[in-house]
Amino acid sequence: MLPCPQCHRQTKVIDSRESGDRLRRRRVCELGHRFTTYERIEEDYIMIKQVIIMRTDLNMRKGKMIAQGAHASMKVFFDRVEYLDDRPMMSVTGQMREWMEGIFTKICLQVSSEAELLEIKAKAESMSLPVALIEDCGLTEFKGVKTITCLAIGPDDSEKIDEVTGHLKLL
Ligand SMILES: [Zn+2]
């Protein structure tokens, strides 16, 4: 409840109208003081998501891709863990917390080269989006050669991530 600026008593809305992306509200308190507020109209649901971008030029098995994507998704968080007297402490952004307390939205996208993947990573980093790049050690595949397989971006605001990955095809 918004208190009256003059007497700090309870107020009620007596008129409400939209102006642009603001809501103009006339309010009155129990003593009859009137004032106007302009409130941002909140979207019901600002979507938070994480995207996983997988290289398709490596012809990985489905199981391999799932494992690599899972590494990427988790690495975003593991990179934020610090140990304080052997107790893990993870510092997360507000968006990360919301994502963890929600439905863990993940979108899987594809690129066809390492260069394209690294370009997207650089752009995401320049926008301060959280990223995690996965380099497979090559023990079981890729003939022993260390290979960059995928990238996770987010969790963060969907619209912000779309600026970086909106042009990519779904995997
Ligand atoms: Zn008042």
Image: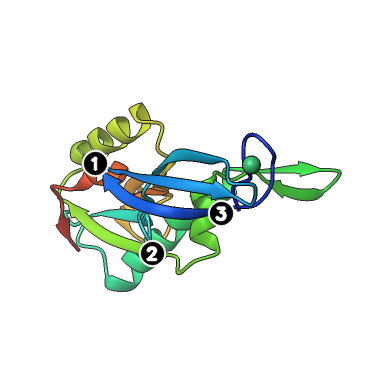
Amino acid at dot 2: Thr
Which dot marks residue 152? none
Q: Can residue 158 be seen in this view?
A: no
Name the outermost residue toward the top: 126
Q: Residue at x 28, y 43 (%)?
A: 21
Displayed-image quarter of ligand 1: top right
Amino acid at dot 1: Gly
Q: Which of disc 3 and disc 2 is earlier in sequence?
A: 3
- Badge 2 density bin: few <14, some 14–19, many ≥20, Cα 10 Å: some
- Residue 20's place in the image compared with 57, above or below, is above
Name the outermost residue toward the right: 85
In front here: 132 or 99?
Answer: 99
Rendering coords of residue 92 (x, y %): 59, 45
Which dot marks residue 97? 3
Q: Is residue 136 visible?
A: yes
Along the horizontal axis of the image, is 157 left or right of 54?
right
The residue where tag 1 is placed is 20
The residue where tag 2 is placed is 105
Rendering coords of residue 139 (x, y %): 43, 56
Along the horizontal axis of the image, is 25 left or right of 58?
right
Disc 1 residue lies near ligand 1 with CB under 8 A: no
